[in-house]
Image (cartoon, grey):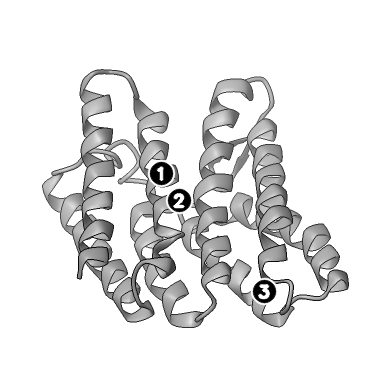
Amino acid sequence: MLALIICLAGILAILLVDEYLGHKKILRAEYKRKFVHIVAGAFIAFWPWLVSWRQIQLLGLAMLAVVILNRRLGIFNFMAETARIGFGDVFLALAVTLSAALTSDRVFFMLAILTMALADGLAAVIGKHYGSHWKYKVFGQKKTLVGTMTFWLVALLIFGFSMPLVAGDITPQKYILLLVVLPPVLTITENLAAFGLDNLAIPLLTLLALKIA
C-alpha cells in the first residue's frame, strides 16, 4: 500500500511542480508540457520495482480517467495549448496500462516507457531550442531535423546501456541487431504517429521488438 501511495503522490507532485513552474513563468508552452512528459514518464518506467503489474494497470486506468476529466475541467493546464490538436496525455495513460498488460518483464517495461518519455520528450525540447532553421512537416505537424536526430540518439543510448540487463534473454547477435534496427524504426514511428499517437505507438512497438528478439 505504501508503494502505491508513493506512485500516486509522485505523479501528483510532478503535476504540482509543473503548475508552479508555469505560474512563475519558469517553464512555458512546449517546455512546460514536456516537463511532465519526461519526468512523469521516467518515474513511471520504474513502477514495476515498486508495485505489481495489476496495480500498474489500475494506475494507468486512473491516469486515463484523470486526463479525460482534466480535458473537460482544466484543473491542470499542462496540455492546454495542444489539447485541441492532440491526445498525447490520453495515449500516454493507455500506454502505461497496455504495456503493463502485455509484459511481465520489468526491464522491457522500463525500456518501453523510458524511450517514450526521454527520447520523445528530449527530441521536442532540443529540437525547439536548437532546430529552428531545419524544420519540416508531417501530417501538418512541425518537426525538426535536430529533434529527430535527438530521438534516435537518446533511443540508441537507452537500449545500448539497458539491454545488457536482460543479457540472459537476448543474445549478443540480437542485441546488436536491435541496436541497429530499433532506434531508427522508432524514430520513423515518432515522425509518422501524429496527434500524440507516438506516446502509445513507441512503447508498444518497443515491447513487440523485445518480445520477438
Residue shown at 73% from the left, 78% from the top: 168
Callout 3: SS: helix
Residue shown at 38% from the left, 78% from the top: 53
Callout 2: SS: helix
Q: What is the crowding at mark 1: few (fewer than 14 residues within 10 Å), some, or many (at least 20)? A: some
Q: Are marks 1 and 2 in contact (CB under 8 Å)?
A: yes
Amino acid type of the residue that numbered disc 2 sits on in the rendered structure = Ala
Q: Position of residue 1 (x, y in %)?
A: 20, 70
Give the label on residue 163, or none. Answer: none
Callout 1: SS: helix
Give the label on residue 39, or none. Answer: 1
Is 49 displayed left or right of 68 in the figure?
right
Give the label on residue 210, or none. Answer: 3
Question: What is the CA distance from the residue labelled 2 to the residue labelled 3?
Answer: 19 Å
Residue shown at 44% from the left, 60% from the top: 46
User: Disc 2 designates what residue?
Assistant: 42
Residue 29 falls in image quadrant: top left
Q: Position of residue 204 (x, y in %)?
A: 55, 70
Residue shown at 82% from the left, 72% from the top: 174
Amino acid type of the residue that numbered disc 3 sits on in the rendered structure = Leu
Q: Position of residue 212 (x, y in %)?
A: 71, 81
Farthest-out residue, front: 2
